[in-house]
Every structure is written in C-alpha cells, then in structure tokens.
Amino acid sequence: MAIQTQTYFLNLGPQHPSTHGVFRVILELDGEVVVRAIPVPGYLHRGVEKLAEARTYTQVIPYTDRLDYLANMLMNWGYVEAVEKLMGIEVPERAQYIRVIVGELSRIASHLMAIGSYAGDIGGLTGFLYTFRDRERILDLFEMLTGSRMTVSYFRIGGVADDLPEGFIPLLQKFLADLPGLCDEYDGLITGNEIFQARTKFVGVIPPEKAINYSLSGPNLRGSGVNFDLRKNRPYGIYDRFDFEVPLGKNGDCFDRFVCRMKEMRQSARIIQQALDGLPEGPIQAKVPKVIKPPVGEAYTEIESSKGIFGCYVVSDGSNKPYRVHFRRPSFINLGCLAELCVGWKIADVIAILGSLDIVLGEVDC
Amino acid sequence: MFGKGLIKGLQITWREMLAQKVTVQYPDEQIPLPDRYHGRFELDADKCIACMLCANACPNKVIQIERTRVGKKQYLTKYVMRIEYCMFCGLCVESCNQDALRFSKVFNMNQYFRSRVRLTLADRPAPAEEPAEEAGSEQEAKKKAPAPKKPAGAGSEAAAGKS
C-alpha cells in the first residue's frame, strides 16, 4: 500500500437491511478496506431461555418458533427432542414422518429466504422476489396445517399437534414436482449470473480446518468441503431411513456456501418425497401425561437445522417447569468467524460475506 | 462466453413477465383462509364451564376469567383476553375440552387505541337464583348472555372494518 491514511470507524447497522435484522458491525476502515470488524449482536435479545424457566414444558414451544423464525418447525423439533429424551418418550411412526416432512419443508423455506436475500444483498433484488414467491407456497402449506404461517407451534412433546389436513398432500406433491424447475430458474437467474459470481467467488474463503476450529456447522461448514451433516453422521428421528446426498463445496467461499443451499433444497425435496411415500397410518401423539413432569435430570440433543447444528439443553428439577433451558444456536456460533473473515475486504464484500453466513437475528440474540 | 448467464437470467424474467400474477388486490380480493386459521378468538359462553384449562394453558397469561358458583357448577361471568400479549399459538383452543373456545377467520384486529385492543368474549351477570330454580335461570341467562357480548364483538368488528 503506497499511501497510509488514517483509519476511521463506520457503523454498519443496527438498522440496515443487509444485516438481515438488527445487527451491528463496527468497521474500522482504511479507505474502503476493512482493517478490523467488531460484530455487536444483542439488539434482538428477548431472553427466551429465561422466559422458558417460567413456563411449563409445553408452553415453551411457541417461544422456540421465535428463535429462527425462518425455520420454525426445526426449532420446535430441537426443543421437543430434548424433552422427549429427558422423559424417554417414544414418538409414533406417523408423527415421525410428519416431522420429517414439515422439518424439511421448513429447511427449504429457510434456504429460499437465504438465497433470495443473498441475491438481494449482492444487488439483484429480482432473485429475492422469485424465491419469495415460492416460499409463499410453503407458508401456505404451513397455514393449512397449523393455522399460522410463521409462528407455527406445531410440535408437541411426544408428537405433533394435528394430523395432516385434507388436501395437504396433493398441494405438497405439486410443490415437490415444481421445485426442481424452480431451482433451475434460480440457478439461471442467480447462480449463473456472471456479476453474482464475480462478487462471490473466492470472497470470504473459509478453509476446512478453520471452519472446524470456529465450530461452524450447516451449509457454512459443508461449503468448505467438510462432510458433516447430523442427518447422516448421527441420524436422529428416522433420518437413517432416507436416501439423500450431502452437497459439499470446494473452495469454502461465499459462492460455495450459496450453492450448497441450492443443492440442499433439491435433497430436501427428495427426503420429503420418500417420507410421503412411506407415510404410515396411526396415532400422531404418544401417550404423554397431561401435566408434563420429566424426572430430575438433564438432556442435550442436537438436530441439523437449516443454519447448522441446533442443540437444546434442558435441565429438569422434577417440577412442571424446566429448571434451565439452553439453546445452541447455529447462527450465533457461525457468526463467530465474521470478524476475521471481513478483514482485508471492501465494504461491499462485508455485505456479501455476512449474507453468505445466513444468520437470523432472532436466533443469534435468542 | 461472458454474458451468457446474464442473457439466460433476462430470458427468465421476460418469461415471468407474461406469466400469471401471484398477488391479489387485497381489500377487493382476498385469498381464502384455511379452516385452521388462527384468527380472532370466539367463545361460546354457554358451552364454557369455566374450568380454567385455557387460562392455565396460556404461556403469557392472556386469558382472564371471572366465575361464580351457581348451584354445583361454575358459571362464567367474564372472559377477557389481553390480546395484545397473545402469541396466537393455539394452546388455549387445543386445551378446551368443551369446544367452547375457537379460532375465527377474522384477522384485522388492529385498533386505534391500545385500550380497545382487549378482547372481551363474555361479560354477563351470574344468575342469582337458588339451585332449585337453576334450570329456569340458566335458560334466562342463556337468553341474556349473548346480549352484552354482542355489542362488544360487533363494536370491535366495526372498528376493524373501518381500519
């Protein structure tokens, strides 16, 4: 660098559309180049973990919707899985299948949001509208199933709240049939776009070792080429029965993380199709006492959410309210590497890097 | 060739331009709502046995119930939902054994004043008769009961319609 100029600070956020919520990054800049980035989360902190201590086990479920509100079914799942482990409840087959169907739908909805908003971050707002148009179909399905579009509160300890309504499966089949075509459309519109590629390829590279050291998970980890997916490596629920691939990236740059999500949507559709084909009849709710009082003890479970590994830790003191609930939120942990990733890149690339990590502030701040 | 991707993207947008619209002109047209839609609550006060299950199921203590004992049974006198705290999770409706509490498809519940947000689903005097005349008084109460309830519901509906 020929000319050394005085560095200055620039506040990115908290109210900035490209930070995907209320998230602040303090950037120390040398001209346009980032010298230091200090992420400041916490603007959306609602104290869900503390609130859970004053609620009964079932009453916590609506709060988990509000963690990662883009993949709400998966958040429900992570929590009920922990309580079920604590109580030793066996979930009926049909409920398991329904969980997989809605969970994977949620994953697709979350990834649609991720790729759409990423296209918007890069400067192509058109892509955002396309993915939103199709995400709407998933939300309509959820509305039909649960009555709510986003805050579904659908999972219950020991099963699910309601059976699939009439007309749900044909609509879902139609969506699944359309999805590959829609993905091709996004590929043509966003992935194949040269400007998009120029903005994202070899930007914000995370080598595999660093990804592991930063404890990244989900598409961010797999984008770096590390083959780790809980659904494959440590199957929970009935994931061991499905045939699907885990898409991997090569370079670990923003583009690979993006492409991983694109490919994962197609795999999720495959899983849903298999689950629909194997959907058994039967009860959707295990026999659970009316007042849920798990035995004294603790349980920790992990599921593969759309953002990464979502863990839930529940401690019971034998009463009808959890003594302590803790959520391992993948978005928050994935965000850890942001400060290091941004250094040396220009301001516009900071937006590209942040977008590629796909954070949801409801989950980061909890 | 550089620019091939751009041309392909443009083709897609051109195709979309001629495709059918996915949005509707909202106030004039409305998308049909599913049966399970979580809209405003409805209470059939005559079915309600004031068992407090819904109030206890609520994560946010939204439901406030006042009841009195008439003969051997509990009698619901007031049912107020502090709807400003409601998450519309549906745990109350799920907990109701009597099918008294339900969701309706009314979704425009916005009000100009915070004080009007509160949803009074039942507000009725308890029949002051002795248990011997219970049957008669209950009949009377049933006739009377919807009377104070209706203006509240109609009022908020009208206000919702305006906004």
Image (tube, coloured by chain):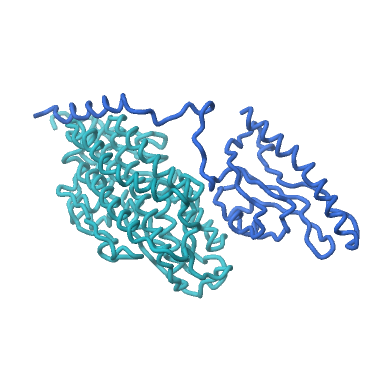
Chain colours: A cyan, B blue
Q: How many marks?
A: 0
Q: Is residue B138 left or right of residue A182?
A: right
Q: Quadrant of residue A311?
A: bottom left
Which residue is pictured at 43% across the width and 66% down the height? A82
A43 shown above or below A4:
below
Q: Is residue A236 left or right of residue B1?
A: right
Q: Position of residue A107 (x, y in %)?
A: 34, 50
Front residue (pair A327, A156)? A156
A62 shown above or below A348:
below
Q: Is residue A151 left or right of residue B21?
A: right
Question: In the rendered view of the protein, which quadrant contains the N terminus of chain A?
Answer: top left
Q: Position of residue A291 (x, y in %)?
A: 58, 68
Front residue (pair B119, B21)? B21
Which residue is pictured at 52% across the width and 70% down the height? A288
Q: Quadrant of residue B59?
A: bottom right
Q: Position of residue A364 (x, y in %)?
A: 39, 49
Which residue is pictured at 16% across the width and 28% down the height? A3
Q: Position of residue B74 (x, y in %)?
A: 78, 60
